[in-house]
Amino acid sequence: MTAEIIRDHTQLQTTIEGLKRSGKKIIFANGCFDILHVGHIRYLQEAKRLGDLLVVAVNDDASMRALKGEGHPYMPEEERLEILAALRCIDYLTLFTEKTVDSLLLQLKPDVQAKGTDYTKETVPERETVLSYGGEIAITGDKKTHSSSWIKSDL
């Protein structure tokens, strides 16, 4: 089974609201996921264990270039979505264009926002947004010793 990709945030909101009404605990994670590596897998698997469903928001190509600079992404957004959709720990995927996921968090109001270990609960950029609607923040995954940006290539 592959994750469902829902590009329309209003449609995703309707889906999430229905799942929450049925008692499901919704976990939200986000990132670039350019070259998928074990750090991503550990982050997402641990996030999924916190609840019933995992929603992952992926930076689109333009927002990734703004964050990481020219030459990024290595893989276009459609390929990153396809690869992530194959992971059984992910239930729903969407793209986002902003620098942070504040607006998407306010729209979806997941129970938990999971961030990687390059953050603490106090340094998560969307911390105040999550707390404003009563959500929780969780730090998941192993120590940040893997990064797509650190991978060297002679391509």
Image (cartoon, rainbow, N blue to C red):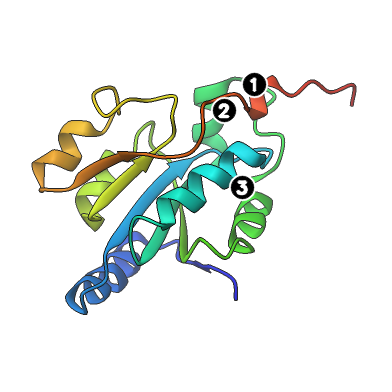
Disc sitting over residue 113 in the figure: none
Query: What is the x, y in percent for residue 38?
Result: 65, 40
For mark 2, what is the residue?
Answer: 65
- Quadrant of residue 124 within the rendered picture: top left
Q: Earlier in the sequence, mark 1 or mark 3?
A: 1
For mark 3, what is the residue?
Answer: 77
**Is residue 19 at all visible to an observer of this figure?**
yes
Nearer the observer, 12 or 142: 142
Disc 2 vs disc 1: Cβ atoms closer than 8 Å?
yes
For mark 1, what is the residue?
Answer: 70
In the rendered view, tell whether residue 54 sits above or below residue 124: below
Q: Amino acid at mark 3?
A: Glu
| Lateral position of residue 85 relative to residue 95, left or right | right
Mark 1 and mark 3: Cα distance apart in space: 15 Å
Mark 3 and mark 2: Cα distance apart in space: 11 Å
In the rendered view, tell whether residue 87 sits above or below residue 40: below
Query: What is the x, y in percent for residue 56?
Result: 44, 53
Residue at left 71%, top 34%? 74
Secondary structure beneath dot 3 equals helix
